[in-house]
Amino acid sequence: MTRVFSGIKPTGHLTLGNYLGAMRRWAEVDQRHGDAVFCVVDLHALTVDHDPARVRRLSRQTATLLLAAGLDPELCTVFVQSHVDEHTRLSYLLECVATDGEMRRMIQYREKAARERERGGSVRLSLLTYPVLMAADILAYGTHEVPVGDDQTQHVELARDIAVRFNQRYGHTFVVPRATRPAVAARVMNLQDPGAKMGKSDDSGPGIVYLLDEPDVVRKKVARAVTDSGADVVYDPAGRPGVANLLEILAACTDGDPAGLGDGYTSYGALKKDVADAVVEVLRPLRERHRELCADPGYVDGVLREGARRARALARPTVDAAYRAIGLLPAEAEVVVGAG
Ligand code: TRP
């Protein structure tokens, strides 16, 4: 069976963009057709300035929202990265295979590091080595497919390169993964700035619909979305990015086609009303399920405990094999067991 692995960083409240662009597909497709593993990658949240209490809170909230969005612990494995030591164990080995040049070439590193330096801040070393930890996340599980957004394909490519190199040098150990992108990924843009992705890490409210926003907040944000000059509703992502984004969101919520949907509208107001209704409807079951899960924190704890147990069992043999392949002396007990 195809092993699918993806991760989500607890660096902000999850958004409609996270849901329509990734989580919904994880729930509807990936967990049903593959042997899927989903990880709240909390160690990755420590690569930039962070507030410990907030990371802890967001890790739990992210896991809860993954379940609320339909990830079913009967079908897939959901866990928190720091609960499974294999990630950091493997990451160090991979640091001995990757090069510093490769790290410095990563676009995300360059952008984030430049931004940090501009602010006069310092750049954590872990921001540079982040892609190696991500490669470890992926390779530890014998992953075939990594469903991620475009901004992560370079990191998945790096994981491929590292896997191939390790296998060539030290013998076949890792499955060589590939990034997959859903055929119809909804690319949800910021309602106030349709040139930018609706991301969770840039916590500036008005253009971002959070999964836990109350319906009237959702309606307000959609009503205030920037549109473009011109009054007719046409789908033209380059020329009319604001309207195109609204059509894109409506299409994603109603299983429609953004280009065709435009024909039905003669005013921005009517479009916005339908977008708001559609978003509220899509988020309703998720919010309800989230409320139920919050009322029973023991359940979420149990899912994460069991998820970590399964994840450990999946990753351990591969990481142990990598330790042996790269030349580390097995611990005594292992020699006895492995001698046969
Ligand atoms: N780097 C990813 C992001 O910022 C998160 C991530 C970490 C990830 N490890 C992963 C995604 C492994 C897929 C597989 O979105």
Image (tube, helix red, strand yellow):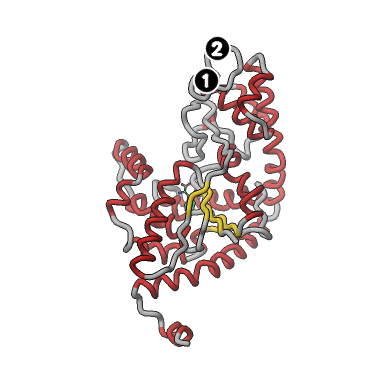
Q: From this viewpoint, is residue 173 visible?
A: yes
Kind of residue indicated by mark 2 = Gly
What whole-number distance in Å separates the C-alpha atoms at marks 1 and 2? Answer: 9 Å
- Element type where label 1 sits in the image: loop
Q: Which mark is residue 53?
A: none
Q: From this viewpoint, is residue 217 visible?
A: no
Residue 268 location, quadrant: top right
Q: Please give the residue where the numbered disc 1 appears in the rendered image.
A: 240
Q: Residues within 10 Å of mark 2 (few under 14, many from 20)?
A: few
- At 38% across and 56% down in the image, what residue appears? 161
Would you say 189 lies left or right of 295 here? left
- In the image, residue 337 sits, relative to residue 175, either above or below, namely below
Would you say 45 lies left or right of 297 here? left
Q: Please give the residue where the numbered disc 2 appears in the rendered image.
A: 230
* x and y percentages locating residue 263 in the rendered image: 66, 19
Which one is in front, 264 or 218?
Answer: 264
- In the image, residue 208 sits, relative to residue 76, either above or below, namely above
Which one is in front, 2 or 204?
Answer: 2
Which one is in front, 293 or 109?
Answer: 109
Q: How many marks?
A: 2
Would you say 171 lies left or right of 250 here? left
Kind of residue indicated by mark 1 = Arg
- At 35% across and 54% down in the image, what residue appears? 129
Check the picture and name the quadrant holding the N terminus.
Answer: bottom right
Q: Residues within 10 Å of mark 1 (few under 14, many from 20)?
A: some
Q: Is mark 1 within 8 Å of ligand 1?
A: no
Tell which circle, 1 or 2, labels the residue nearer the N-terminal end.
Answer: 2
Residue 22 location, quadrant: top right
Contact check, label 1 and label 2, Cβ < 8 Å: yes
- At 42% across and 68% down in the image, what residue appears? 172
- At 31% across and 51% down in the image, what residue appears? 102
